[in-house]
Structures are given as structure tokens and as C-alpha cells.
Image (tube, grey):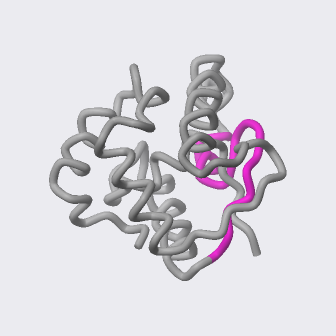
């Protein structure tokens, strides 16, 4: 099976330590983190994805906002540049330990952080990156 992710969640998964919007959101994300750590592939999608799922019952969920769509565009550009391949709907990414190491190094260096501007989690993610990604749930 493949985990459906929107582009900016490629960055979020690097620093996920079990914090989120609600208990349902965190349970879902914990399960996704375990699947990624077990080697399940990522399928890039346009719009709300498997991480967004617990929020979609709320008509005001930010998952559909233009600001989040712009965040996806910026993340796709940055991650695509890092991987040397376009990040677009339909692309499949095989999650390997060496890929996570490269993604995290680029994230810590600020090379893939354009999508993080204005995100409410940015300070937490910066702190996690500065601490060597200790306690992250995707390995």
C-alpha cells in the first residue's frame, strides 16, 4: 500500500514527534509514521491527504486553504530540487534511511524551508532540527 501525501507533508514528516491538532490527528499521524518507518512508499497527491484525514470533517479545516496550496507548491519545488526530480501528483517516492538523512540535512540547513514560512509549527520544527531530530517518529 502507498501513503498519500501532499508535498508540504514531505517536510512535516521529518520533524514529527507526536504533536498535532487533536488526539485523532496524532493517532492517525502516529500510524502513518509507523508505516513510513516500515518502508511504505509515498504517493504524491494534490490537496488533502492521509495526514489531513482526521481534520476533513471540519468545514473550516485549513487543509483546503490557498495558503496551504501555496505551501505545497513551495515544498514541491524545494524537495524536487533536492531529489533532482519533479514532485507532482502521481509521483511515488520510496522512503529509505539515506533519503531521510539527506532530507533532514537539507531541512536543517534551511534549503527546503520555503514552505515553512508562516506555519504555526515552524518554531517547533526548527528546534527539533537543531536537536538532531531527536524523538522523531519517522525513521
Query: How many numbered discs, if any?
Result: 0
Asked if 117 appears above or below 25 in the picture, the reply is above
Which residue occupies the extreme bottom position in the image?
38
Identify which residue is drawn at 40% across, 36% down: 111
Frontmost residue, 91 versus 19: 91
The quarter of the image holding the C terminus is bottom left
The quarter of the image holding the N terminus is bottom right
Left of 112 or right of it: where is 136?
Answer: left
Image position, residue 94 (x, y; %): 65, 69
Which residue occupies the extreme right position in the image?
90
Identify which residue is drawn at 47% across, 46% down: 11
Frontmost residue, 50 versus 105: 105
Asked if 94 appears above or below 130 in the picture, the reply is below
Image position, residue 18 (x, y; %): 34, 59
Magenta stretch: give its range.
40-56
Query: Residue 135 magenta-drawn?
Result: no
Image position, residue 79 (x, y; %): 56, 43
Asked if 17 appears above or below 55 in the picture, the reply is below
Left of 1 or right of it: where is 106?
Answer: left
Left of 126 or right of it: where is 119?
Answer: right
Image position, residue 137 (x, y; %): 37, 68
Identify which residue is drawn at 19% across, 44% down: 127
Which residue occupies the extreme left position in the image?
131
Identify which residue is drawn at 49% across, 29% down: 115
Query: Residue 51 magenta-drawn?
Result: yes
Which residue occupies the extreme front position in the image?
84
Left of 103 or right of it: where is 28?
Answer: right
Amino acid at each position: 500500500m502507498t501513503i498519500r501525501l501532499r508535498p508540504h507533508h514531505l517536510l512535516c514528516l521529518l520533524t514529527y514527534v507526536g504533536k498535532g491538532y487533536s488526539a485523532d490527528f496524532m493517532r492517525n499521524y502516529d500510524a502513518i509514521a509507523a508505516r513510513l518507518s516500515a518502508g511504505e512508499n509515498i504517493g504524491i497527491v494534490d490537496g488533502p491527504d492521509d495526514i489531513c484525514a482526521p481534520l476533513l470533517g471540519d468545514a473550516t479545516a485549513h487543509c483546503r486553504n490557498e495558503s496551504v496550496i501555496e505551501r505545497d507548491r513551495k515544498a514541491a519545488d524545494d524537495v524536487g530540487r533536492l531529489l533532482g526530480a519533479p514532485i507532482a501528483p502521481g509521483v511515488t517516492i520510496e522512503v529509505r534511511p539515506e533519503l531521510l538523512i539527506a532530507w533532514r540535512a537539507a531541512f536543517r540547513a534551511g534549503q527546503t524551508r520555503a514552505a515553512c514560512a508562516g506555519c504555526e509549527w515552524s518554531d517547533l520544527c526548527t528546534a527539533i532540527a537543531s536537536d538532531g531530530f531527536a524523538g522523531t517518529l519517522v525513521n
